[in-house]
Image: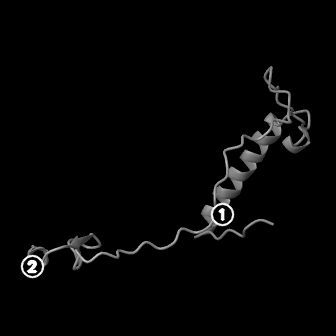
Amino acid sequence: MTKKLKFRNAEEKRKHEEAAAKWDGILKKYAPKVKLEPKSKLSYTPKVPAGREKQDIPSVDTGTWSTAPIRERRYSGDAMIGIGMMHKSNLVPIFKAEEAKDIASMRR
């Protein structure tokens, strides 16, 4: 199915048809004489390097590791009085009231 072409005028349509006919002639002239098979029908087997013919290689035992989720970490001390936001999402711990005032008065 070919897309229907629209032309501005009859002159453009005539030029297009002449060019298409010329192109068809070129394709017929230089077309291969032998029909080529699609690549999917060709078979290729890569050469295996020496020493890699063996396919049953055992896995390496890396020990036992737990895949359990890590429990949430929380601060349980009493030295930190809060968390301040310095720039955008840069969170910093605050240990003194003076630090909180300094962060609040910083230029934004």
Q: Does the residue at mark 1 contact the one at mark 2 (Cβ under 8 Å)?
A: no
Q: Quadrant of the C terminus?
A: bottom left
Q: Quadrant of the N terminus?
A: bottom right
In front here: 74 or 46?
A: 74
Location of residue 83 with respect to 12 vertically, above or below: below
User: How far is mark 1 from mark 2, CA to CA?
Assistant: 78 Å
Q: For the point 39% across and 75% down, which residue is it?
A: 74
Say which residue label 2 marks.
101
**What's the amino acid at mark 1?**
Lys
In front here: 67 or 19?
A: 67
Task: Return the x and y of residue 57 as percentages of the image width and height.
Answer: 81, 35
Say which residue label 1 marks.
13
In front here: 38 or 21?
A: 38
Q: For the point 75% across and 50% down, which residue is it?
A: 21
Task: Give the foreground label among 1 and 2.
Answer: 2
Badge 2: how crowded within 10 Å, few (<14), some, or many (20+)?
few
Location of residue 25 with respect to 66 vertically, above or below: above
Q: For the point 86% across and 29% down, which residue is it?
A: 54
In front here: 105 or 79?
A: 79
What is the quadrant of residue 16 in the picture?
bottom right
